Image (cartoon, rainbow, N blue to C red):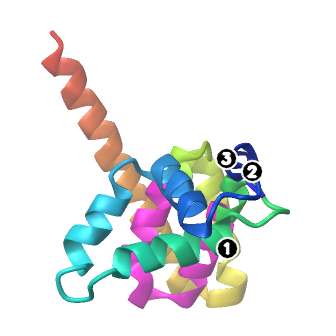
Amino acid sequence: MTDLTNEMGSSASALEKGRAIAETLNPDLEAILAGRYDAALPGFSETLIEGAYGRFYAREGLDLKTRQLATVAALTALGGQTAPQLRVNIEHTLAVGASEREILEVILQMAAYGGWPAAINGINAALELFSERTNAQSASAWDSI
């Protein structure tokens, strides 16, 4: 289990564990999912939080950073149709302590499994996100002057 879910204990429900993990990845994640999907698919955000994060991410054996790196690898290998999810998961992977270099290396490794186009698209997505984050940090630094 992840450190978070170990702290919660084995009696915590999958939904509770999922919410704790989602909060770590992005404090607004559940609200973002609810706002995007629940009007069309009532309860979808809760189902996703419980299923993906509370049942898969909360399993023992891998820490959250490793799970996120594996997710980035899988989404990269799957190719262009996963671009929005890849971008979100690169952000989540940074949030749990992975470095930009680790993320880029995982994406590059997928050239052997998903092909060069998938890896190059993944690298481009990561570089764009890194650049946006740097620009946002620079802008916020100027706001404090």
Q: Which residues are magenta?
A: 68-92
Residue 61 image point, x, y percent: 85, 63
Identify which amino acid the numbered label 2 is placed on. Answer: Gly
Is residue 106 left or right of 120 when viewed as pictured? Answer: right
Q: Nearer the viewer, residue 54 or 77?
A: 54
Tell me, yes or no, whether the highlighted magenta stretch contains residue 16.
no
* Quadrant housing residue 104: bottom right
Identify which amino acid the numbered label 1 is placed on. Answer: Phe
- The N terminus sits in image quarter: bottom right
Callout 3: SS: helix
Q: Say which residue label 1 marks.
A: 56
Mark 3 vs mark 2: give the one in front.
Answer: 2
The furthest residue to the front: 11
Q: Say which residue label 3 marks.
A: 4
Q: Residue at x 15, y 9 (%)?
A: 145
Mark 2 vs mark 1: give the one in front.
Answer: 2
Say the numbered circle drawn on residue 9. Answer: 2
Tell me, yes or no, whether the highlighted magenta stretch contains residue 76.
yes
